[in-house]
């Protein structure tokens, strides 16, 4: 589960006579999100580049403000003291999410979009809008998601996206915020992971003994992505097969050396694992085996030789 919200850039530009009050409401939402554990908001572009009013950038808008207190709040926001701002929404090392953007197309009001609303679905987080128009006065936004299938066909579905343009909308997402609080309380780190694995993953996920040493070799970023992926599966927010995964080709199946590299221990017996999630940074993989209602994790680490 991620620790950030995303900004819906479609809620800009604002009307000049409403801009100040809309910004104040926006800041109140961000303060509430911070209290709920979402201390970062991701954006498609640097906020300074957005047109706050039609044809007016943030810097120009800031320069036109006469109200000192409001101007100070705007400066605090852009200086990351209201909430931390990160760009872009999907970073170059976040391969799973980049693949989703490449393989899917999202539509809002029949218009294609790959910004905040689309990424709220990709990250399973909440999109935050300015309350500039009535269309943003809701806690759920419906998007159309088109997926290109392996056989070349296109599958389209309507999907709900968590959304807020006022603090009142946040009340409709209490289950989401409760899940974030639970994740934060677990405080899973590379140092405590192995000893606490049965507390953090009590139902669905089981780790083969080989994973203990593998975890220590991961970068912090890769470890965090791996744990986030597996916690989504453990809590049934996602299925393991919802992630970008594949099996092994004929070369691995027929080569004893390559096959041996994918043998991991379940109940004191070595078992061949071929399915692997390919969504981690730095070309890392999670090898898994579904068996008797459990998902066994045999390997988390660099791409294995094939």
Image: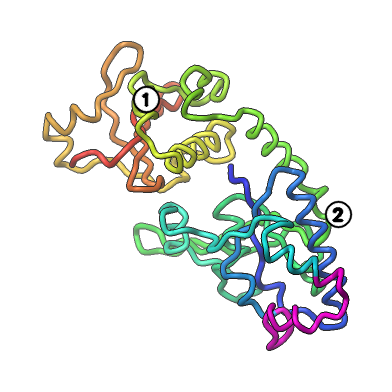
The relative height of residue 22 versus residue 275 in the rendered view (above or below) is below
Q: Residues within 10 Å of mark 1 (few under 14, many from 20)?
A: some
Quarter of the N terminus within the rendering: top right
Mark sitting on residue 7: none
Q: Residue 129 at x, y = what percent?
A: 73, 65
Mark sitting on residue 168: 2
Residue matched to label 1? 211
Looking at the picture, tell me which residue is in the foreground, 187 or 257: 187
Q: Secondary structure at mark 1?
A: helix
Left or right, 82 with respect to 240, comes to right
Looking at the picture, tell me which residue is in the foreground, 294 or 130: 130
Count of residue discs: 2
- Which residue is at 59% across, 70% downward? 46
Q: CA distance from mark 2 to mark 1?
A: 44 Å
- Sequence order check, earlier mark of 2 and 1: 2
Q: Is residue 293 visible?
A: no
Looking at the rendering, the stretch of residues picked out in magenta corresponds to 52-71
């Amino acid at each position: 589960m991620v620790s950030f919200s995303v900004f819906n850039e479609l809620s800009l530009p604002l009307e000049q006579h409403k801009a100040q009050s809309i910004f104040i409401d926006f800041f109140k939402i961000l303060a509430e999100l911070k209290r709920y554990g979402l201390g970062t908001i991701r954006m498609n572009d640097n906020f300074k580049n957005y047109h706050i009013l039609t044809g007016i950038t943030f810097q120009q808008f800031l320069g036109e403000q006469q109200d000192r207190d409001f101007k100070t709040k705007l400066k605090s926001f852009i200086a990351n003291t209201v909430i931390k701002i990160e760009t872009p929404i999907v970073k170059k090392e976040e391969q799973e999410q980049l693949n989703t953007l490449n393989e899917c197309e999202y539509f809002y009001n029949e218009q294609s979009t790959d910004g905040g609303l689309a990424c709220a679905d990709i990250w399973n987080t909440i999109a935050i809008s300015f309350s500039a128009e009535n269309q943003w006065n809701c806690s759920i936004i419906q998007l159309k998601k088109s997926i290109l299938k392996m056989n070349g066909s296109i599958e389209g579905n309507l999907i709900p996206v968590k959304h807020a343009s006022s603090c009142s909308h946040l009340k409709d997402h209490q289950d989401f915020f409760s899940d974030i609080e639970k994740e934060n309380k677990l405080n899973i780190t590379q140092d405590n992971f192995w000893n606490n694995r049965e507390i953090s993953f009590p139902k669905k996920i089981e780790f083969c003994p080989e994973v203990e040493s593998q975890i220590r070799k991961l970068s912090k970023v890769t470890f965090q992505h791996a744990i986030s992926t597996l916690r989504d599966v453990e809590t049934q927010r996602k299925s393991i097969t919802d992630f970008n995964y594949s099996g092994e080709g004929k070369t691995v199946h027929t080569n004893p050396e390559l096959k041996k590299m994918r043998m991991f221990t379940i109940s004191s017996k070595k078992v061949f694992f071929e399915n692997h999630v390919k969504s981690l940074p730095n070309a890392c993989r999670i090898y898994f085996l579904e068996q008797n209602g459990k998902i066994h994790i045999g390997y988390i680490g660099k791409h294995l030789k094939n």
